[in-house]
């Protein structure tokens, strides 16, 4: 896993706007239980591409694992906005379910 992390870090360092590589890096951090690092990558993606729906969802998941429930709710709400704009009803349902779970 560390080899993948290091490889992805190098790719992102060479091309910080590569949201695909950055998302992969975020997911590797999450798999390693490094949720703060994963969240930083999701936030970086959203700074470049605010319509990146998966980053809103996974960022919310990372926030939940960090115990930041209110922040997670905000991420899910922003994800709902993004899915409404893109017309992705299935993803919107997933965000709404995640938000409902948090109360």
Image: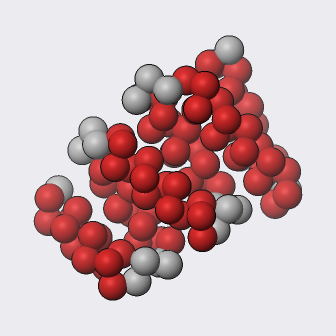
Q: Residue at x 60, y 70 (%)?
A: 48
Report the residue at 27% width, 39% height from top: 33
Judge by depth and name the residue closer to the eye, 29 or 47. 47
Q: Which residue is painted at 85% across and 51% down in the image?
A: 84
* Residue 35: % across, % down: 35, 41
Report the residue that reaches farthest toward the left.
Answer: 3
Looking at the image, can residue 98 be seen? no
Asked if 98 appears above or below 86 in the picture, the reply is above
Query: Number of marks in the image?
Result: 0
Is the C terminus in the top left, top right, bottom left or bottom right quadrant? top right
Specify whether residue 77 is in view.
yes
Query: Percent position (x, y) of residue 62?
Result: 45, 38
84 lies left or right of 43: right
Query: Vertical placement of 18 versus 90: above or below?
Result: below
Quarter of the picture containing the N terminus is bottom left
Taking the image as shown, residue 13 lies to the left or right of residue 55, namely left
Residue 50 at what x, y percent from top left?
Answer: 67, 62
User: Residue 67: x percent and y percent?
Assistant: 44, 23
């Amino acid at each position: 896993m560390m080899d993948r992390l290091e490889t992805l870090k190098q790719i992102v360092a060479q091309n910080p706007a590569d949201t695909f590589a950055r998302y992969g890096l975020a997911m590797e951090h999450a798999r390693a239980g490094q949720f703060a690092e994963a969240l930083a990558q999701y936030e970086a993606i959203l700074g470049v591409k605010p319509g990146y729906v998966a980053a809103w969802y996974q960022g919310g998941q990372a926030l939940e694992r960090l115990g930041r429930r209110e922040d997670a709710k905000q991420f899910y709400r922003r994800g709902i906005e993004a899915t409404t704009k893109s017309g992705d009803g299935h993803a919107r349902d997933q965000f709404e379910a995640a938000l409902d779970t948090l109360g």
